[in-house]
Image (cartoon, grey):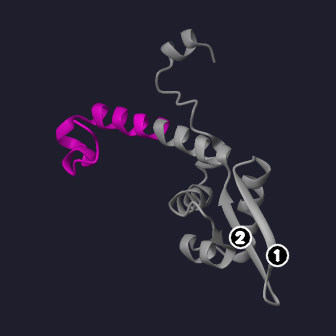
Amino acid sequence: MSKTEANHAPFSYDGLDRVIHEKARLGLLTSLMAHPKGLAFADLKQLCGLTDGNLSRHLGVLQEAGLVEVTKGYEGNRPHTSCRLTRTGRRRFLDYLAVLEGLVRDAARAAGKEDAPAARFRILPV
């Protein structure tokens, strides 16, 4: 979409990346953002409340998109899988959050300051 088209569709939120926007993947990326050195598969599974299969599938999507790096190896004699954000993943996630922040601001303005929970709880900047 060109800048001209974007000006005519201010609520299109083109920066809401469909790869990131899915609920489980949003949780995975948030968890990994909070742990820059990465997390073990089991820890990520627990933090996000996912099954082994769901976690594997979502990690595969994120890995294919270049957002997450998955490393498989061994700790002692036991298999160990760890996951971490790539540089690209960190940048795209921050870009996504900036668009999401704008969406929340727009929604709060549209609802009116007195009706917006974000304004009531001082989540948004004044």
Residue 103 on the magenta span:
yes
Badge number at residue 82: 2
> Main structural element of the magenta stretch: helix, strand or loop?
helix
Q: Position of residue 85 (x, y in %)?
A: 65, 55
**Which circle's residue, 1 or 2, is located before the other in the chain?**
1
Q: Among all residues in the image, which is located at the extreme top?
A: 4
Q: Among all residues in the image, which is located at the extreme left?
A: 114
Q: Position of residue 100 (x, y in %)?
A: 46, 40
Alpha-carbon neighbours of circle 2 within 10 Å: few (<14), some, or many (≥20)? some
Q: Position of residue 65 (x, y in %)?
A: 75, 46
Separation of marks 1 and 2 at Cα, in angstroms: 8 Å
What amino acid type is highlighted by mark number 1? Gly
Residue lying at 71% horizontally and 70% vertically, measured from the top left = 82
Query: Mark 1–mark 2 contact, CB under 8 Å?
Result: yes
Task: Identify the secondary structure beneath mark 1.
Answer: strand
Alpha-carbon neighbours of circle 1 within 10 Å: few (<14), some, or many (≥20)? few
**Which residue position is annotated with label 1?**
73
Q: Is residue 10 above or below residue 68?
A: above
* Region of the chain picked out in magenta, as a range: 99-126
- Name the image quarter holding residue 102: top left
> Which of 53/46 is in front?
46
Q: Is residue 120 left or right of residue 9?
A: left
The quarter of the picture where the C terminus appears is top left
- Name the image quarter holding residue 114: top left
